[in-house]
Image (spheres, rainbow, N blue to C red):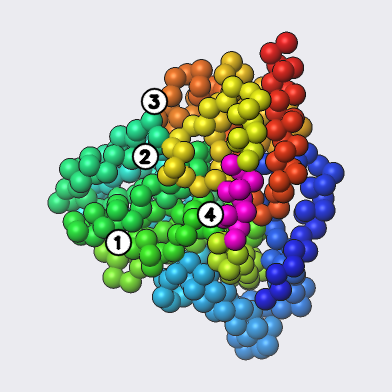
Amino acid sequence: MKTRDTSPHTQHLGQAPMYFDYAASTPVDGRVLQAMLPYFTQEFGNASNVLHNYGKNARRAVIRSLELIASSIGATAPDQIIVTPSATSANWLAMVSAGTAGSKPGHIITSPVEHSSVIAAARHLEKIGGAVTWLEVNSNGLVNTDQLKKEIRQDTALVSIGHVNNETGVCQDIESISHLCMDRGVTLHTDATQSFGKTGFRVDNALVSMATFSAHKIYGPIGIGCLYVRNNTATKISVPGDYSATANVPSLVGFATAAELTASMSTSEISRIKYISMEFLRDLHSRVDVQLNGSSTNRTWDILNLSIRNIDGADLARAAKIAISTGSACRTGSREPSPTLHAMGLDIDRCRSAVRVSFGRFTTATDAGAAVDEIQKVVSLLRD
Ligand SMILES: Cc1ncc(COP(=O)(O)O)c(C=O)c1O
């Protein structure tokens, strides 16, 4: 595979405000786009109709893509991959399937710092009569694993703990959690949407039963994700009828290409981004009164959640000529303090001043330096 970046998006980003919102969505990598293009115009067949070459080629692309996605994330076989329209629906599928598998809605364990789609699925289960245990979270953003040990019950159908938090970059100790769940015979689902390619996460090493992924966080197209389900997982995934709809071949090819690239580049990409992000934070620290929210050790460095004292995060995000957010993409614009930061026990001022700055494949050290200049400038303006 070629490794040259041909992304038209990086050229475009030269004129637009510099992009520091990779946790919300990533531009499609040029190599991914190139791989997808033929499936819009030449290989456009229906993968279910293999009576002619159009369909046969599409079918081959589907099979190959599933194999690539599986091997990139550390799965052993393509039939462990359930393709979904998003990570949101993969999370729903995992949780609602597990929570409703018995004769009555069962018990699940999760935490208040999960992605909103996990929280929504848990709330749904509560509404239909299921029991949900919400684990405590400390000020570093880490879930209480001692409590997890105590809360697992005979009827616990699922533990769902995300690996990397989308707002803070805090990384849960998923290996310990998975050993704990295995010892107790409980199915563990993890949302690995912000983790794959940003940590060494692979489903084989992490020993999870189910894991969620999304293409648009790894330089693939928006609108496709997957749920990995390990063989012999107790939870039987009930896939709604329309999952047998005509395969979205271009997106699947894009997802697979993005996953393969991400897996092959992750070691060098992680250290490059860590260096840039740490320099950014050091530089910013020397110029404004900034606090890093969440653990400074158990984290990925592509996502920084920062509070600048006496500065409203939304004002800063609006005024700065760089693309940043005040929290997760789904919460930006909300005046309510982030439930994640709130669960970590941060005071209201610190929650209100929080901004998320996230770095990615196309961020350079020069961009990061310019972002520090811009933040310092806007902070001075807002203080005047
Ligand atoms: C951790 C996490 N899970 C799930 C999602 C939802 O992803 P999608 O846009 O594919 O539904 C996101 C996106 O922000 C995320 O960061």
Badge 2 or badge 4: first in the primary sequence: 2
Is residue 90 within the magenta segment? Answer: no
Say if 284 sits above or below 25 in the image.
above
Residue 235 is tagged as 1
Q: Quadrant of the C terminus?
A: top right
State the extent of the magenta-drawn residues as a range: 268-278
Disc 4 marks which residue?
A: 198
Q: Secondary structure at mark 4?
A: loop
Badge 3 or badge 4: first in the primary sequence: 4
Q: Secondary structure at mark 1?
A: loop
Marks 1 and 3, how far apart at CA: 34 Å
- Can see residue 83? yes
The residue sitting at the top extreme is 384
Residue 345 is tagged as 3
Q: Residue at x 26, y 64 (%)?
A: 234
Residue placed most toward the observer, 377 or 113: 377
Badge 1 or badge 2: first in the primary sequence: 2
Q: Amino acid at mark 3?
A: Gly
Marks 4 and 1, how far apart at CA: 28 Å
Q: Amino acid at mark 2?
A: Leu
